[in-house]
Amino acid sequence: MKKLIKKFIPNFLLSWYHCLLAFFGAVFYRFPSKKLIVIGVTGTKGKSTVVNLTGKILEEAGFKIGWISSATIKIGEKEWLNPYHMTMPGRFLIQKFLREMVKKRCRYAIIEVTSEGILQHRHRFIDFQVAVFTNLTPEHIEAHGSFEKYREAKGRLFKTTKKIHVINIDDENAKYFLNFPAQEKYLYQFKDGKGKIKIKDQNSRNLKEIGVSNLQLNLLGEFNIYNALAAISVGLSQRINLEICKKALEKIKVIPGRLEIIDMGQNFTIIVDLAHTPDSFEKVFRLVKSLPYKKIISVFGSAGGGRDKWKRPVLGEIAARYSDQIILTNEDPYDEDPIEILNQIEKGTEGFQKSVIKILDRREAIGKALSLAKDKDVVLILGKGTEQTMVIGLKKIPWDDRIIVREELTKLKPFLKI
């Protein structure tokens, strides 16, 4: 139905339709963002982690907060897994959440902002005061038409946010985002093992440079240092002391669905992660490769529905470079032939002489990986993280990789050293 609508209705009419929905949603809930300090986080990777880390810093400083991310939704003391299979909920729903944050007397709202959400005007009529850019790598190219248009969509958040910009200047696309004017800019980078945050005013004059060292993060990976620097930059922009920022971050043990280790006493390591792009695959596999292990068993697929078909063989190639055993399975095939998706991924593994098993049933695939794992092996389950549904055809099936892992481990208990 959606494809038919897009085929016969001109893009400008669809755009007006989405914009009107955003306006009526804001009107219905009485423009709640005007009573909040709203922080928008955009980029390809790291958004939900930055939302989480920023929220913890604000809470450590004594503020009541709410957030909307692909992993969880939080309003005051209540937090729950995002059930919508989309990072940014619909226009009425997002305004409803903001209104509930106002009712709960939250001071801050942190929103993960996606390029598709921007195309559908879900960010409109939300009074963003802080915009954060994490990084940019190719994703959703079919939906946008080109990488440049994808970047341009991300840039609209910065165009409409005039007060504070937070930008990762180590990313090669930083120059594009630096062109947008703001009252203050916080530019973070990580080089030679040291973090730096430069603060500039609207005339691009250097106001201050702050070094960030001795940060004892419990989260693995250099990419999480960048995520932490983004969150610290937001904290500093709100006049929160650096020591309070560091104290908050050092308390965090795990981000749900992001390099989340499932430990039920087994003698091998299980990691669940959302990684579903070539860049995120590369980073996760490199990190795991640096750990002490005997064998890497990876379980993953690729989303259907025409989403970024180009990346499928690339994911296969990356997995083949790092994995000892690859198990390809369903992720969210939507209306595509799931076998064809796996075949396209498998093409990238050709020439590596690695064992590839194709099992459409994701539960069965996870169970197979766990049964193959031996002492000190690593089982990497990628692509869904905390997502609460899997879309096959027109059906949304309740799903959570972490729950499935625990259930399958329980079945294997008699055969494992647990």
Image (spheres, grey):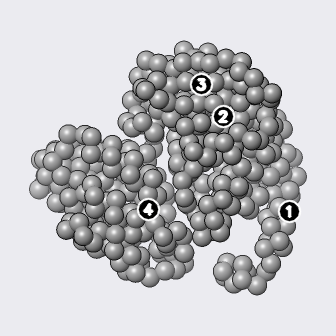
Between circles 4 and 2, the one closer to the viewer is 2
Q: Which residue is mark 3?
A: 197
Q: On the image, numbered disc 1 is attached to which residue?
A: 20
The Cα atoms of the two marked residues, 3 and 4, are separated by: 40 Å
Q: Who's the residue at 58% across and 63% down the image?
A: 140
Q: CA distance from mark 1 to mark 3?
A: 39 Å
Q: Of the residues shown, which amino acid type is indicated by label 2?
A: Val
- Choose top left, top right, bottom left or bottom right for residue 313: bottom left
Label 2 SS:
strand
Q: CA distance from mark 2 to mark 3?
A: 10 Å
Q: Tag on residue 399?
A: 4
- Determine if residue 251 is in view: no
Amino acid type shown at disc 1: Leu
SS at circle 3: strand
Residue occupying the point 33% across, 50% down: 285
Residue at horizontal 52%, vertical 44%? 46
The residue labelled by disc 2 is 166
The residue mark sitting in front, 2 or 1, is 2
Percent from the top left, x then y, of residue 240? 65, 19
Using the image as rendered, state which of residue 314 and residue 361 is in the foreground. 314
Image quadrant holding the N terminus, namely: bottom right
Disc on the earlier residue, 2 or 1 = 1
Left or right: 192 as drawn, with respect to 110 = left
